[in-house]
Image (tube, grey):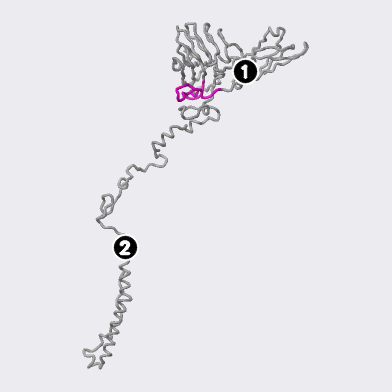
């Protein structure tokens, strides 16, 4: 800021004569008074105005200088003698870029943690009991929690539904519920740890379950897997889709298992299917042997959730089915039971089946128990019989 000017009228001095005492007649005291007045005016200006303004200017200058740095000062090697443009490397941010927030990568530690989680898209449909297409590993979910729905029926062979009641089967046809022997010379025995399937034919018999076409969705991926506890022969899971046209079928075979282990195969269901078979296979054509099977599973998606290895390397099932639920599923195809009916010769009784069956069943009665039974009408929901007794009966609606 500009300093104030001294504006006091000093005419009291400049108006004096050259010889003020002689010409002006001023006494020494009067002359002194005039000089004292001028000096006092100068003194007052200096002390009260000029000094204050100089002090204020000095304070402002000092404050301004305190906010400045010397031109020799440098910022990360850049002198302040000119405008300085800093880069991200100058301030220790060389790895920073202008990536949008949604595109920024995560740290290695966070990515490692995320890799152990199931992606949201992979979990769509879990409420329906199914895990859709995707790549889930056993580490991404606890046993028995997120595994997909098993589309097979009576798949746990360590405690199978066995309404026919035999401990072993030696003929071609039905064995434990929903499963068959395919060729003469093959046998099935029920054991505590699973089913023992023996091939003594030298051919290639298999142990199949035939599935309704509505079990699968055409054009979608499915995985068929089987867990084996051991056996003298190689074994594997195989899924067959019979089709229209030539060659008339597509065969999807899983990995061969020598001892205990899991065989699994992923395949896409053709559009022109006419029949579906989930098979447990033993050996090759021309060999004999056996296997013990623990469980099998058909599920939607490209991964198996039947079994996993624990920390000791032992195979464990993700879940064990509810026996009552599996029995009810089996009774959609086959029922064997005993029932008491009380009628007289002129009336009839209805044998109520446990559930509605797939189609009107083929019914038989144990003639040794009730030789005079007459089945007059057969329904999907029950059987009408004329007579009275406790009878053993079976109703089959197998595929």
Find disc 2 in the rendering and name its residue.
Answer: 64
For the question of whether residue 248 can be seen, the reply is no
Taking the image as shown, residue 295 lies to the left or right of residue 42, namely right
Residue positioned 40% across, 42% down in the render: 100
Instruction: Based on the picture, tell me whether residue 382 belongs to the magenta stretch.
Output: no
Q: Is residue 346 above or below residue 70?
A: above
Measuring from the top left, give residue 179's x and y in whole percent. 55, 14
Mark-to-mark CA distance, 2 and 1: 97 Å
Instruction: Based on the picture, tell me whether residue 313 belongs to the magenta stretch.
Output: yes
Taking the image as shown, residue 261 lies to the left or right of residue 358, namely left
Q: Which label was assigned to residue 37?
A: none
Measuring from the top left, give residue 160's x and y in whole percent. 57, 17
Q: In which quarter of the image is the N terminus?
A: bottom left
For the question of whether residue 308 can be seen, the reply is yes
Of the residues under marks 2 and 1, which one precedes in the sequence? 2
Q: Which label was assigned to residue 331?
A: 1
Measuring from the top left, give residue 228's x and y in whole percent. 49, 17
Q: Give the range drawn in magenta.
A: 297-320
Measuring from the top left, give residue 358's x and y in whole percent. 62, 18
Taking the image as shown, residue 267 lies to the left or right of residue 355, namely left
Residue positioned 39% across, 40% down in the render: 104
Taking the image as shown, residue 210 lies to the left or right of residue 360, namely left
Q: Observer-nearest residue: 78 or 322?
A: 322
For label 1, the SS is loop
For label 2, the SS is helix
Q: Is residue 115 above or below residue 346?
A: below
Q: Quadrant of residue 386?
A: top right
Q: Residues within 10 Å of mark 1 (few under 14, many from 20)?
A: many
């Amino acid at each position: 800021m500009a300093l104030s000017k001294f504006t006091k009228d000093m005419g009291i001095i400049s108006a004096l004569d050259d010889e003020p005492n002689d010409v002006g007649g001023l006494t020494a005291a009067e002359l002194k008074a005039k000089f004292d007045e001028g000096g006092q005016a100068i003194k007052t200006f200096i002390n009260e105005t000029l000094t204050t303004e100089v002090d204020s200017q000095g304070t402002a200058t000092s404050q301004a200088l305190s906010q400045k740095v010397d031109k020799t000062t440098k910022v990360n090697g850049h002198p302040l003698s000119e405008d300085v443009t800093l880069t991200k490397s100058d301030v220790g941010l060389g790895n920073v870029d202008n990536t949008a927030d949604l595109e920024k990568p995560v740290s290695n530690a966070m990515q490692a943690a995320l890799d152990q989680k199931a992606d949201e898209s992979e979990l769509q449909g879990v409420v329906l009991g199914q895990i859709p297409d995707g790549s889930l590993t056993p580490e991404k979910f606890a046993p028995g929690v997120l595994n997909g729905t098993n589309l097979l029926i009576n798949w746990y062979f360590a405690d199978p539904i066995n309404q026919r009641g035999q401990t072993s089967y030696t003929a071609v046809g039905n064995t434990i519920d929903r499963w068959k022997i395919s060729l003469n010379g093959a046998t099935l025995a029920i054991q505590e740890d699973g089913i023992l399937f023996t091939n003594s034919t030298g051919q290639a018999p298999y142990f199949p379950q035939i599935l309704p076409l509505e079990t699968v969705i055409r054009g979608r991926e499915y995985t068929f897997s089987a867990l084996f506890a051991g056996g003298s022969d190689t074994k594997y899971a195989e899924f067959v889709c019979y089709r229209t046209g030539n060659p008339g079928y597509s065969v999807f075979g899983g990995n061969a298992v020598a001892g205990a282990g899991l065989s699994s195969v992923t395949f896409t269901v053709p559009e022109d299917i006419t029949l579906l078979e989930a098979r447990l296979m033993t050996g090759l054509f021309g060999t004999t042997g056996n296997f013990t099977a623990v469980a099998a599973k058909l599920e939607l998606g490209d991964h198996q959730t039947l079994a996993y290895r624990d920390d000791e390397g032992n195979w464990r099932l993700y879940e064990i089915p509810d026996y009552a639920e599996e029995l009810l599923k089996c009774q959609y195809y086959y029922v064997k039971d005993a029932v008491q009916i009380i009628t007289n010769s002129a009336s009839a009784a209805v044998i109520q089946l446990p559930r509605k069956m797939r189609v009107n069943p083929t019914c038989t009665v144990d003639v040794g128990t009730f030789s005079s039974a007459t089945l007059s009408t057969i329904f999907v929901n029950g059987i009408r019989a004329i007579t009275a007794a406790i009878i053993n009966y079976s109703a089959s609606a197998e595929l």
